[in-house]
Image (cartoon, rainbow, N blue to C red):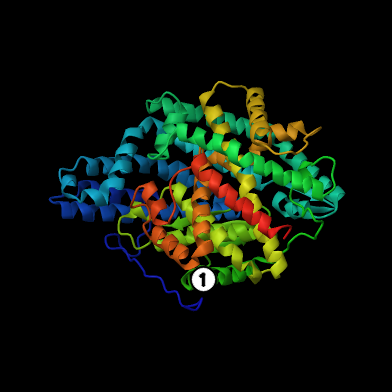
Amino acid sequence: MSAASYVPETFPHRWLPADVELKTWEQIEPYYQQLLERPIHSPAELEQWLRDVGELNSAVSQERDSRYIAMTCQTDDPEREAAYLAYVRDIEPKLKPYRNRLRNAYLDSPHRAGLPADRYEVFNRSQENRRNLYREANIPRETELAELGQKYQKTIGAMTATFRGEEKTLPQLAPFLEEPDRALREEVWRLISRRRLQDRDALDDLFDRMLALRVEIAREAGFDDFVAYCYASRERFDYGPDQAKAFQDAVESEVVPLARALQQQRRVAMNLERLRPWDLSVDPQGRPPLRPFADADRLAEGATEIFSRVDPELGAQFAFMRQRNLLDLANRKGKAPGGYQTTLEDDRLPFIFMNAVGVDGDLRTVLHEGGHAFHTLAARGEPLADYRDAPIEFCEVASMSMELLGAPELTVFYSEADARRSYRELLEGIVLILPWIATVDAFQHWIYRNPGHSRDDRRAAWDALMDRFGGLVDWSGLEEVRSNSWHRQLHIFLYPFYYIEYGIAQLGALQVWRRSRSDRQAAVSSYRSALALGGSRPLPELFEAAGATFDFSAATIAPLMREVWEELHRLGDA
């Protein structure tokens, strides 16, 4: 299949008018009222009603996501900010009670018993859980949290620093940390760190307010603490805090020693007495940094070719996204930090956002977000709207597997030698990121188990976890930067407890990778089949469909780490 031949199926409205406008609450409310008033006389009518509910929810969600995309693409545009906040303040609080009433209407319907039990097992479990959590009194708190989250995005997006006479965003400064000139790296690292510390108090103020609101939300919903509430709200039906602790312990025993061994190899290779924070991104052999592309167009073009080599239809899908302007890849001033893929739910199409600046890591980001996009496209034909999305733990298998499946094709951007070097950096990055994931996860458990803590307590807890899971880096004289380094992890601010998912999914992705090394076609086929299930099956079954086991204890982590270590040994210095 050529990269230009993907023509996706369209899904016109079956109940809503084709040209419906849902930009104000006055336009939205009548449709929810119609659904609440519709009589239902049979399981078949209930099922059709569910599809119409999904159609309306998808159309309204697309309005929100379109405004979010516009705002994050240019956080310093007051019109975009106002449009997004208008949705958060004026529509979302009024929407939640209606959606709760619709949920109750479904759960209390006498015709629900006539629906196929296996088909609706996952859906019913989710709806019942959401009903248990819903409290109208929490809606203003959730609105305030959304506003504080937008303020965090704006604060981070506005961070710039003057470097040699030019104003640059912090992501634009990051490539200098890969330069062989150690004095240059230190200069830039200190410049970035000073700029982040300028907003230390503002970010702590933001987080303190977020913490208080989250504690109030949990108590209002009848939970002893926010940990239990958040596990329920994230629908972690298949694991709990005990399994999270087992993951942290397994990372400490099975991964941290490898991460420290890698950093020791780096220190020796660089002939350094001490490894400092500005020594972690540069090539330890002193080679120039990998610079795979000069602009975002070349990134998109090359990514299309990589996806086509993994599977021709995936390449065609990415080419379609490019043609439809469903990508915003380049970094610029005012753009929100990070990268994401979101779904325009009414169109059932993905959108990819990132901050590419021409570094090797940008290749992994576009492969990662591409995996999410393929997940959206694979499940878009699912008639039940809720099943077009999967649990985050499996969504990240989709993205992280694509990083690994795409790694053998990096010669699209590089020579053979540089492609091997990039592949090695990917595997090293996996070993190094797992301890960071454990750190962030353990930190969030500490925060919400100790909600009355002071800022000094919080910094001390972070430092203790950095000691437990950190590497061999010497932070002498940089203690303030280290103690506040959690500020750069946006998940802690915006998405509480959303981070262990990356660790769980990384283990699933490594199992897909392990299989691909002996039977690539079978691995890709199982991967795509699993994506097509969306969220219609429980999490362990989704892992199983992809050829992986849903387990994140030492029994799973240890053999995977051995295989990664063996592959790193085979690659040598790459």
Q: Is residue 428 left or right of residue 536?
A: right
Instruction: Return the residue nearer the eye: 287 or 133.
Output: 287
Q: Quadrant of the C terminus?
A: bottom right
Q: Secondary structure at mark 1?
A: helix
Give the residue number, with chain letter if any, for mark 1.
Answer: 315
Q: Position of residue 238 (x, y in %)?
A: 39, 40
Instruction: Return the residue nearer the eye: 395 or 220.
Output: 395
Q: Is residue 454 left or right of residue 543?
A: right
Q: Residue at x 67, y 43 (%)?
A: 259
Q: Amino acid at mark 1?
A: Gly
Query: Neighbour class for label 1 at 10 Å: few (<14), some, many (≥20)?
Result: many
Residue 241 in the image: above or below residue 67: above
Q: Residue at x 24, y 50 (%)?
A: 118
State whether residue 195 appears in this view: yes
State whether residue 357 appears in this view: no
What count of labels does the image hold? 1
Q: Position of residue 449 (x, y in %)?
A: 51, 25
Q: Residue at x 58, y 47 (%)?
A: 561
Q: Position of residue 428 (x, y in %)?
A: 66, 51
Q: Is residue 37 left or right of residue 398?
A: left
Instruction: Return the residue nearer the eye: 462 or 10.
Output: 462
